[in-house]
Image (cartoon, rainbow, N blue to C red):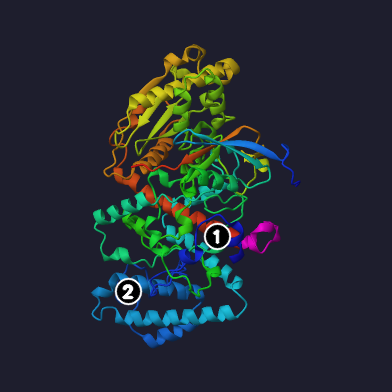
């Protein structure tokens, strides 16, 4: 796996830097969570009195007998407790510290054994298994779990490849963290995150072998070849799952930890409901930080399909589409048709008028909003309805509508000449004069209360919309929107959800990677 | 692969930067990784590769792929002369 780094080339991540941690007291490498905590340690949120005090001798023996995973868990929990609670304890957490040290020593001892022994491969898998068991636990709610399973299912599908794969390839890593970092900083301050936020023991590690090669694993950075799905820059939707991770960046290089053995360990033991936006401040390794996925076409699409609606009813355009659209409709040259013909390749194979909904993220003036084009039922006797949803009211609906309408007209023009009308679920009378039948509606929607959540709102608009929208929109359905459609916090909390999703995907990908390693089919350039 | 620079071996591609619409032309071997092209473009235009996305017909390019093995919608198409790659700068929103 080490070699892989060299071979892949082109990625500017210094794994030594990325993977090591600066704070020594909190060794992240082996933080493996176990789903069932020992009764005595209980959950991390409980006071330390229950979790870590006393009977040192007993504990010491305990550590030696403890399975790796449990030891790791123990270390982690103790750290958690210590960092959270130490200042409240009579001894300022001294005992905890001692216990912790013993555990870490034990861990170190084992690590050495392993290094001297047969290499890391052997214990990688058991550890991994522990992680996988932990998935449910760390994610918590069953809702999340089902979401994950749905997501997986989606990964197994190759249906509607166009929409599900708007974005191939990861290529360049996206550094666009500066702004987000700033945002996070603000976030932290605003939320008045106490000393607790410094408990960075919740460290997520990313191993070198994180380069997974499985086709289906798409949520990853780096250059895995088999990728067939659609990573897409998510952070340019104003999000960054992990901007604070830069702390990790400037860490020691010459650490001896067995990098090979690192697992992506996410320790979100805290209750999921206790998660607030500040938790974004948790660190992620560089490699996760720079992931690109296109959330709508991967996750939302799948959500849409899970509602028995058929995924073909929604089409998610990618985040660069609107810019191209503007370029295409604004073009005045003689070869306009030719240019539009070229532009049409962006939705090749899709007849947009057959879809029930077309979702187009709009980016202008450092802000994201959303356009949803609804193609109503044939019985509605209505042309397309263009909805504009803006969480800040920054974008001029007029210019947005104008561009979208021009686009629809152009496409109609094109199709009118090419396609049999019977293929389109719009009544003939409407279709024949479609350019005049396009309705526009600026929707009143919940508004963001900060200056960084626009991307999340766009995603949340999408999510809620496809959740609630009927098979085909009818005018009366428009009542479902409004300023009180949802609470702004709900949209903001999507940040955590996506973050978990990403971590999950990374973990899964890593697992697959591990299992693939043993099989020779993975290709020449991998090892 | 032959070493000659005949047209059979190469493909002429243009890369359009979305911020200024300027097109840069490249003649590359069909078997070269697209990463090389991306790097060359960024160098030429003094852009940070990390802040760029390269797409072909709206679909992101895999840098480990070569023009001849380019996949679009899981169908191997290969790139042809005159094909246009979009160099898109990633954007942030608030």
Most frequent secondary structure within the magenta stretch: helix
Q: Which residue is disc 2 drawn over? A: A82
Asked if residue A462 can be seen in this view, the reply is yes
Residue A264 spot, x, y in % from top left:
49, 63
**SS assignment at label 2:** helix
Q: Going by the picture, which residue comes out furthest to the right?
A: B2
Boundaries of the magenta span: A515-527
Position of the C terminus of chain A, as image quadrant, is bottom right
- The residue depicted at 52 percent of the width and 26 percent of the height is A352
Read off the residue under disc 1: A210
Relative to B55, A28 lies left or right = left
Percent of width and height locating residue A354:
53, 25
Position of A4 relative to A225 (above/below): below
Asked whether residue A525 is drawn in magenta, I would say yes
Residue A161: % across, % down? 59, 38
Q: Is residue A508 above or below residue A125?
A: above
Residue A228 seen in the current view = no
Query: In the image, residue A475 lies at what x, y percent?
Result: 38, 23
Q: Chain of mark 1?
A: A
């Amino acid at each position: 796996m080490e070699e892989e780094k060299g071979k892949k080339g082109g990625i500017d991540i210094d794994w030594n830097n990325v993977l090591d941690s600066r704070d020594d007291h909190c060794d992240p490498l082996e933080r493996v969570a176990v789903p069932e905590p020992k009764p005595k340690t209980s959950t991390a949120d409980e006071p330390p009195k229950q979790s870590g005090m006393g009977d040192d001798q007993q504990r010491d023996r305990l550590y030696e007998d403890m399975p790796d995973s449990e030891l790791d868990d123990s270390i982690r929990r103790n750290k958690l407790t210590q960092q959270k609670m130490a200042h409240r304890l009579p001894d300022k957490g001294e005992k905890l510290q001692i216990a912790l040290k013993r555990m870490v020593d034990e861990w170190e001892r084992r690590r050495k054994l392993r290094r001297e022994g047969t290499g890391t491969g052997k214990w990688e898998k058991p550890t991994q298994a522990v992680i996988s068991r932990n998935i449910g636990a760390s994610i918590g709610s069953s809702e999340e779990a089902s979401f994950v399973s749905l997501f997986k299912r989606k990964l197994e599908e190759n249906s509607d490849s166009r929409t599900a794969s708007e974005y191939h390839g990861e290529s360049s890593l996206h550094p666009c963290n500066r702004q987000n970092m700033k945002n996070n900083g603000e976030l932290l301050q605003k939320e008045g995150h106490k000393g607790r936020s410094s408990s960075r023991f919740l460290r997520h590690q990313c191993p070198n072998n994180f380069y997974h090669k499985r086709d289906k694993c798409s949520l990853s950075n780096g250059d895995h070849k088999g990728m067939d799905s659609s990573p897409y820059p998510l952070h340019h939707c104003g999000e960054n799952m992990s901007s604070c991770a830069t702390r990790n960046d400037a860490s020691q290089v010459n650490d001896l930890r067995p990098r090979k053995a690192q697992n992506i360990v996410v320790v979100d033991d805290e209750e999921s409901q206790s998660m607030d936006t500040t938790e974004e401040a948790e660190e992620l390794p560089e490699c996760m930080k720079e992931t690109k996925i296109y959330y709508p076409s991967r996750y939302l699409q799948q959500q849409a399909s899970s509602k028995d609606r058929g995924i073909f009813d929604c089409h998610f355009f990618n985040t660069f589409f609107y810019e191209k659209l503007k370029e295409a409709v604004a073009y005045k040259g003689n070869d306009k048709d030719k240019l539009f013909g070229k532009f049409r390749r962006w939705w090749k194979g899709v007849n947009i008028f057959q879809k029930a909904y077309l979702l187009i993220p709009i980016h202008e003036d450092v802000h994201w909003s959303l356009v949803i084009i609804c193609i109503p039922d044939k019985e509605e006797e209505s042309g397309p309805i263009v909805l504009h949803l803006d969480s800040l009211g920054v974008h001029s609906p007029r210019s947005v509508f104008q561009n979208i309408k021009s686009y629809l007209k152009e496409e109609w023009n094109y199709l009118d000449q090419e396609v049999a009308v019977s293929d389109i679920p719009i009544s003939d009378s409407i279709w024949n004069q479609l350019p005049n039948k396009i309705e526009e509606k600026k929707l009143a929607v919940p508004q963001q209360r900060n200056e960084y959540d626009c991307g999340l709102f766009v995603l949340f608009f999408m999510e809620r919309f496809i959740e609630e929208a009927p098979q085909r929109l009818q005018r009366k359905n428009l009542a479902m929107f409004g300023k009180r459609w949802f609470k702004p916090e709900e949209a903001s909390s999507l940040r955590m959800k996506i973050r978990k999703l990403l971590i999950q995907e990374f973990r899964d990908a890593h697992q697959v990677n591990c299992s693939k390693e043993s099989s020779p089919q993975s290709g020449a350039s991998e090892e | 692969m032959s070493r000659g620079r005949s047209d059979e071996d190469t493909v002429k591609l243009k890369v359009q930067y979305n911020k200024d619409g300027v097109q840069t032309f490249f003649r590359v071997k069909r078997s070269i990784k697209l990463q090389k092209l991306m790097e060359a473009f960024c160098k030429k235009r003094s852009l940070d590769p990390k802040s760029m996305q390269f797409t072909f017909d709206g679909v992101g390019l895999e840098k480990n792929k070569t023009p001849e093995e380019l996949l679009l919608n899981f169908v191997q198409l290969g790139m042809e002369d005159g094909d246009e790659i979009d160099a898109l700068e990633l954007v942030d929103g608030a």
